């Protein structure tokens, strides 16, 4: 397992002791998106993050002085017809309101880049709302804006 440590923040994959801290941010993330998932889904997600047979992970940003989890990123690997190698998709990213604009969001994404490289699947992508300008300030620095638009099946 790799760690990215800078200043007072350590970025690392979750362990079973991180559930409460991860869940607190997962709930805040849902509030940000004005959605509410059942607690069962939290349990299901967390068990997938820890299962070595499932290519879905979460990493957290931990304040080393306090041990508090102040950021989370959830990501998974999937196949694609466009390459022999899988791609990595970042599903969710969240940093505590009081800890933002200090580089943590960027470090969480860089952690995923490193994990993707180690997996041999360096292609990493994600999407965000058109209206999420704050996140896009970060994303245009750490990635590039792909010339795509997203469609969804009606009702889902
Ligand atoms: N004024 C000026 N610049 C800003 C501002 C602001 N208000 N907000 C952000 N920025 C810029 C900064 O310049 C900074 O870049 P820099 O490091 O080069 O200076 C960058 O945007 C922010 O980078 P970080 O500090 O690395 O990111 P942060 O820790 O603030 O986390 C995040 C960013 C995750 C988007 C955070 O704001 C957040 O949790 N927002 C709510 C949830 C959210 O939007 N999540 C992403 C949804 S998309 C997805 O989940 C895939």
Image (cartoon, rainbow, N blue to C red):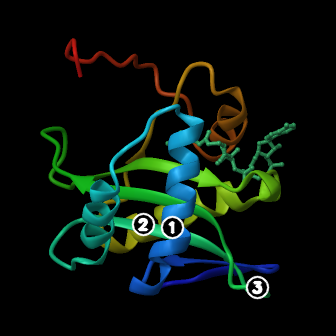
Q: Please state the total of marks drawn on the protein image.
A: 3
Please tell me the numbered disc located at residue 58. Answer: 2
Q: Which of marks 2 and 1 is nearer the N terminus?
A: 1
Element class at badge 1: helix
Q: Distance of mark 2 from mark 1, alpha carbons?
A: 9 Å
**Which residue sits at x=56%, y=83%?**
3
What residue does disc 1 label? Answer: 22
Regarding residue 1, the answer to whether it shows in the image is no
Q: Is residue 55 above or below residue 100?
A: below
Q: Is residue 58 visible?
A: yes
Identity of the residue drawn at 76% across and 51% down: 97
**Residue pictured at 42% horizontal, 58% vertical:** 74
Q: Which of 20 and 54 is in front in this view?
A: 20
Is residue 106 found left or right of 127 in the rendered image? right
x and y, in percent, of residue 153 in the image: 20, 16
- Circle 2: element type: strand
- Mark 2, other Cα within 10 Å: few <14 / some 14–19 / many ≥20: many
**Percent x, y of residue 85:** 20, 55
Q: What element carries label 3?
A: loop
Q: Name the image quarter holding the C terminus.
A: top left
Query: Where on the image, by quarter, is ligand 1?
Result: top right
* Vertical comparison of 155 with 113: above or below: above
- Decide which of 106, 33 is in the foreground and name it: 33
Q: Nearer the viewer, mark 2 or mark 3?
A: 3
The answer to whether marks 2 and 1 mark residues whose Cβ atoms lie closer than 8 Å is yes
Judging by the rendered image, the residue that carries numbered circle 3 is 66
């Amino acid at each position: 397992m790799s760690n990215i440590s800078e200043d007072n923040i350590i970025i690392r994959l979750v362990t079973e002791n991180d559930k409460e801290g991860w869940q607190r941010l997962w709930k805040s993330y849902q509030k940000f998106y004005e959605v509410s998932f059942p607690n069962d889904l939290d349990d299901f997600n967390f068990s997938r993050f820890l299962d070595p047979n499932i290519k879905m992970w979460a990493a957290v940003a931990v304040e080393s002085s306090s041990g508090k989890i102040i950021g989370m990123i959830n990501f998974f690997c999937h196949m694609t017809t466009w390459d022999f190698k899988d791609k990595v998709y970042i599903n969710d990213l969240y940093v505590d309101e009081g800890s933002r604009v200090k580089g943590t969001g960027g470090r969480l994404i860089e952690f995923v880049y490193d994990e993707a490289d180690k997996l041999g699947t360096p292609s990493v992508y994600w999407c965000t709302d058109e209206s999420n300008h704050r996140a896009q300030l970060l994303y245009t620095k750490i990635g590039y804006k792909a010339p795509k638009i997203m469609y969804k099946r009606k009702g889902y």
